[in-house]
Image (tube, grey):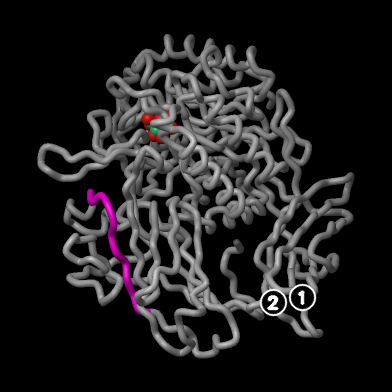
Amino acid sequence: MLRPQASETRDLVNLDGIWRFAVDRPEVSEPWSAPLQGSLDVAVPASYNDLFLDPKIRDHVGWVWYQRDVFVPRGWGDRDTVIRFEAATHHGKVYVNDVLVAEHIGGYTPFEADITDHVQPGKPFRLTVGVDNELSIHTIPPGHVHVVDSGQRRQSYHHDFFNYAGLARSVWLTGIPRTRIEDIAVTTGVEGAAGTIKYSVVTTGSAEVRVVLRDETGAEVLNGSGAEGTLRVEEVKLWQPGAAYLYKLEVSLHGDGELVDSYTQSVGVRTIEVTKTEFLINGKPFYFTGFGKHEDTPVRGKGHDNAYLVHDFELMKWIGANSFRTSHYPYAEEVLDYADRHGIVVIGETAAVGFNLGVSGGMSAKNPPPTFSPDTLGDEMQETHAQHLRELIGRDKNHPSVVMWCIANEPASQEDGAYEYFAPLAELTRKLDPSRPITYTAWLLANAKNDQIATLFDVIGINRYFGWYIDNGDLASAEVKLEADIRDWVEKFDKPVMMTEYGADTMAGLHSLNDIPWSEEYQIAYLEMNHRVFDKFPTFVGEQVWNFADFRTTPGVHRVDGNKKGIFTRDRRPKGSAFFLRGRWTATGNVKPSQQ
Ligand code: GCB
């Protein structure tokens, strides 16, 4: 499924703006069949939770309804009309007038519906979208709904970030040719000074496929024809971390000598390889510096915002970060396009977070059931997880910035059943994309001795909070434990290891001469201690701090207005640690600090 694009043959109408909105009410049985009653105005894209002052909306569990009227452009009589949602978190149902045209489960990947037969060019239609935020033991991420003492329905889950919901990404109406390009896949290679671009194009109907490759100046480099082929670019300009170079592959369809459809795909030529000790990009060892992030900003929640996108990347460049992980779900496609253009390296993650029934709201749960079992995360979850992988890789396969897939964050990998659950998913990921390595992140209580799944992956990502959740306030003991923990991973598995999370909650503006936890000084001392340990291990391939910025969580006794492990505050002001990290990372570049 291609991202919508305007071209010589494709029209695009953006449907973002103010929509009508109402929380589901049992007495209104078919909210889509008429203008929404008692509706509010809502912004799209944005999570709806923080827009209003009513806690019943913020904490609502279940369906909400979005609605607007849409005009189909007059000139679209000869084409198909397709509606596309970049995301509906977590379950969306789309109605055109009274007809259900699409349903999609999974809150962070796009879906679309061909609505040609339900609309008329030049005429309006009523577009209604139901969005359900309810999580269950079979959804990704998993969660539970309880009726609490006040009689309200409340939701709990096993991850800490707030379950923002709604239409947080753009909505598009596209007019596209009936005979068209449906999908494009590219993989790249390097042979000496030449680059290879292998492409394949999926089309509907029969027409001749032609391709033209252009460089960044727009000059034609090569051309070809046929739905599949390999282009060899002599003296190729590589896509490099920190120095992106993007070619443009113009794909066109021709029938009876006429142009039928055209679509332009950006291509970055680069290679990825993982050895037992190194992560190689274009044959050179790459050391990840940067962050686990969240799509999280005040008021918008998880709503995509281009101003924050630009600013966050400016901050990452300023601090010397060369990478980030899309923790804990696929981010908006605009983010990946931007990373492609700016040479920032991305680890792309599924929404499989909270796969650990021993943790609730970020703390240990009481008497948890086994995580992997027929009644908990079993066959049904595995199939849902497979679908999430298909949709993530289907969407993001062509981004040169994406160098690795992370198939789950902090699953209970020390529990029985973890291997059986993950082995088929690891295999599926490799089949869907043989060109990228795969990883997962191991939580604090899954160590090299009890973890059951590390052998399935190419890189071992570990999330470690020694000095925070363990040995809080005692960095000397934390250092001993951290070193022993990493040594065990390095010695047991012949694989590169990286720190995918390490961090300490910090209240901006709280200072102390005594390394008191929550102070800005403690956060720096914590990071310094971690770095001393990382630098002892030659097969360590990266450090991504948790988190880029403070973010909203569910309430909890260990959360003061959210998670405060940010190096920047939620409104993107630097804490003292930002200057400390800038010192280390700008000196490091893409090279391991200990090898400088
Ligand atoms: C983790 C999780 C992350 C949390 C973090 C924390 O291990 O992966 O989602 O936010 O810990 O701060 O507790």
* Kind of residue at badge 1: Ala
> Callout 2: 10 Å neighbours few (<14), some, many (20+)?
many
Q: Earlier in the sequence, mark 2 or mark 1?
A: 1
SS at mark 1 in the image = loop
Q: Quadrant of ligand 1?
A: top left
> Residue at 23% across / 49% down in the picture?
59
Q: Position of residue 337 (x, y in %)?
A: 59, 57
Q: Is residue 342 magenta?
A: no
In the rendering, which numbered label is found on residue 463? Answer: none
Is 250 above or below relative to 144? below
Task: Identify the residue at horizontal 57%, vertical 24% (top origin).
Answer: 453
Q: Nearer the viewer, residue 460 or 358?
A: 358
Main SS type for the magenta part? Answer: strand
Going 37% across and 35% down the picture, which residue do you hit? Answer: 159
Other-residue count near label 1 (Cα within 10 Å), few / some / many at <14 / 14–19 / ≥20: many
Residue 203 sits above or below residue 514 on the image: below
Write the start and end of the magenta stretch as one range.
Answer: 59-69
- Does residue 111 appear to the left or right of 559 in the view shown? right
Whether residues under marks 2 and 1 lie with C-beta atoms below 8 angstroms apart, the answer is yes
Residue 400 position, x and y percent, is: 67, 50
Look at the image and say whether residue 65 sits in the magenta stretch: yes
Say which quarter of the image contains residue 179.
Answer: bottom right
Whether the residue carrying mark 1 lies under 8 Å from ligand 1 is answered with: no
Location of mark 1 (residue): 207
User: In the rendering, which numbered label is found on residue 261?
Assistant: 2
Q: CA distance from mark 2 to mark 1?
A: 9 Å
The reply to whether residue 562 is visible in this rendering is no
